[in-house]
Image: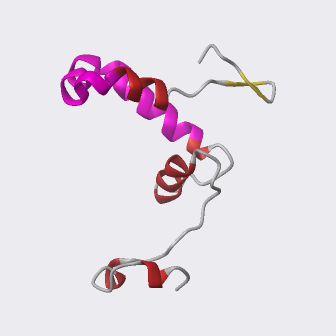
Amino acid sequence: MAYGHCLEPDWLPHVEAIIDVASDGNCGYRCIASGLGLADVDGWRIVRRRMYDEIIGYEDLWREVLGSSFETVKNAVHCPKKQDGHLSKNG
């Protein structure tokens, strides 16, 4: 198994696959998308958008959970919408 040597030996029996995703700043979202079967070109964007919608939809809860980090996390998860092959700043 590629990269198997990077895992703790006790974890290996529980790992079904290791997927190497693009390291373009969206790799965490790409990993989640892959695990959810959304590994197509824009699957990461769907995951990121849904995370942002969750944070905005339950803002009071996430403000309590994240405390002073709320705005930082919200801004980090925000993903501009794709329009005509380009990214829009209007999210």
Name the residue at 56% across, 28% down: 79
Q: Is residue 47 magenta?
A: yes
Question: Which segment is the magenta one?
Answer: 45-70
The residue at the far right in this view is 84
Q: Quadrant of the C terminus?
A: top right
The residue at the far front in this view is 68
| Left or right position of 89 against 51 | right
Name the residue at 62% across, 55% down: 23
Residue 64 in which image quadrant: top left
Dominant secondary structure of the residues highlighted in magenta in the image:
helix
Q: Give how far across and how far down residue 70 sits, in percent.
A: 32, 23
The residue at the far top in this view is 90
Q: Give how far across and how far down residue 81 sits, in percent.
A: 64, 24
Colouring chosen for the image of the structure:
secondary structure
Name the residue at 51% across, 47% down: 29
Compare residues 66 and 35 and report the one nearer the observer: 66
Eyeballing the image, is 7 above or below 27? below
Q: Give how far across and how far down residue 76 sits, in percent.
A: 48, 30
Q: Give how far across and how far down residue 42 sits, in percent.
A: 65, 43
| Left or right position of 12 against 44 | left
Q: Is residue 86 magenta?
A: no
Number of dots carrying numbers: 0
| Left or right position of 84 against 81 | right
Eyeballing the image, is 78 above or below 47? above
Compare residues 87 and 23 and report the one nearer the observer: 23
